[in-house]
């Protein structure tokens, strides 16, 4: 979601009045790109192990909030009923390895809040720092004791950050 929001803010700045980027990245490394490409291949060959792979991936994302895993699995399963959308999203993420958004971040002119979480293994705080360095005047915050699922793990803290940002 954050990658799409950044792309929209870069390409259509007149349509973006404010931007909140939560647990996202403007680039992916080689290992992550390979991971995303593997997911694309699984979707393209209609692999019978797709559902199991998605469930395993979801469990990894919810490792910091195991009490929320069941709901996370339900949401993932509903959102991937037609896995082609997931495959397209994975292809777009893999493309960030060769074409990161970093060189274009300075084109984002909307007020921007960038939120990372202390224990996010998928989009660590360093990824958010890179985005913050590229967007002039952006606000950067780190939410402690949370993994990648900030809205699930720390909804009040995230809401406070967003409300404060939007009220400024």
Image (spheres, rainbow, N blue to C red):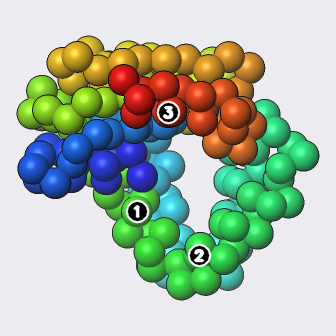
Spot occupied by residue 114 in the image (x, y as percentages of width and height): 41, 27
Label number found at residue 167: none
Residue at image coords 31%, 53%:
4
Categorize mark 1 by other alpha carbons within 10 Å: few (<14), some (14-19), many (20+).
Answer: some
The image shows residue 102, relative to residue 68, as above or below, that is above
Q: Dot 1: what SS?
A: helix
Mark 2 or mark 3, which has the lower sequence index? 2
Q: Dot 2: what SS?
A: loop
Mark 3 or mark 1, which has the lower sequence index? 1
Distance from the alpha carbon under mark 1 to that under mark 2: 11 Å
Residue in the foreground of this view, choosing between 62 and 30: 62
| Residue identifier under label 3 | 162
Residue in the foreground of this view, choosing between 46 and 110: 110
Spot occupied by residue 111 in the image (x, y as percentages of width and height): 25, 30
The image shows residue 4, relative to residue 164, as above or below, that is below
Mark 1 or mark 2, which has the lower sequence index? 2
Residue at image coords 53%, 26%:
161
Label number found at residue 80: 2
Q: Quadrant of residue 18?
A: top left
Residue in the foreground of this view, choosing between 160 and 70: 160
Residue 11, can we see it?
A: no
Categorize mark 2 by other alpha carbons within 10 Å: few (<14), some (14-19), many (20+).
Answer: some
Using residue 161 as the reference point, say whether residue 99 is left or right of it.
left
Distance from the alpha carbon under mark 3 to that under mark 1: 25 Å
Using residue 64 as the reference point, say whether residue 22 is left or right of it.
left
Spot occupied by residue 158 in the image (x, y as percentages of width and height): 60, 32
Q: Quadrant of residue 159?
A: top right
Split into 4 quadrants, where in the image is the C terminus?
A: top left
User: Foreground mark, 3 or 1?
Assistant: 3
| Residue identifier under label 1 | 89
């Amino acid at each position: 979601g954050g990658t799409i929001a950044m792309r929209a803010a870069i390409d259509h700045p007149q349509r973006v009045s404010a931007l909140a980027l939560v647990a996202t990245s403007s680039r992916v490394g080689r290992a992550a790109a390979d991971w995303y490409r593997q997911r694309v291949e699984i979707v393209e060959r209609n692999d019978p192990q797709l559902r199991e792979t998605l469930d395993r991936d979801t469990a990894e994302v919810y490792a910091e909030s195991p009490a929320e895993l069941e709901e996370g699995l339900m949401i993932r399963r509903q959102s991937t009923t037609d896995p082609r959308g997931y495959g397209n999203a994975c292809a777009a993420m893999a493309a960030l390895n060769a074409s990161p958004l970093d060189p274009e971040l300075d084109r984002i002119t909307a007020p921007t809040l960038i939120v990372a979480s202390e224990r996010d293994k998928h989009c660590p705080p360093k990824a958010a720092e890179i985005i913050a360095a590229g967007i002039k005047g952006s606000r950067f915050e780190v939410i402690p004791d949370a993994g990648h699922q900030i809205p699930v793990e720390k909804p009040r803290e995230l809401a406070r950050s967003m409300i404060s940002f939007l009220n400024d």
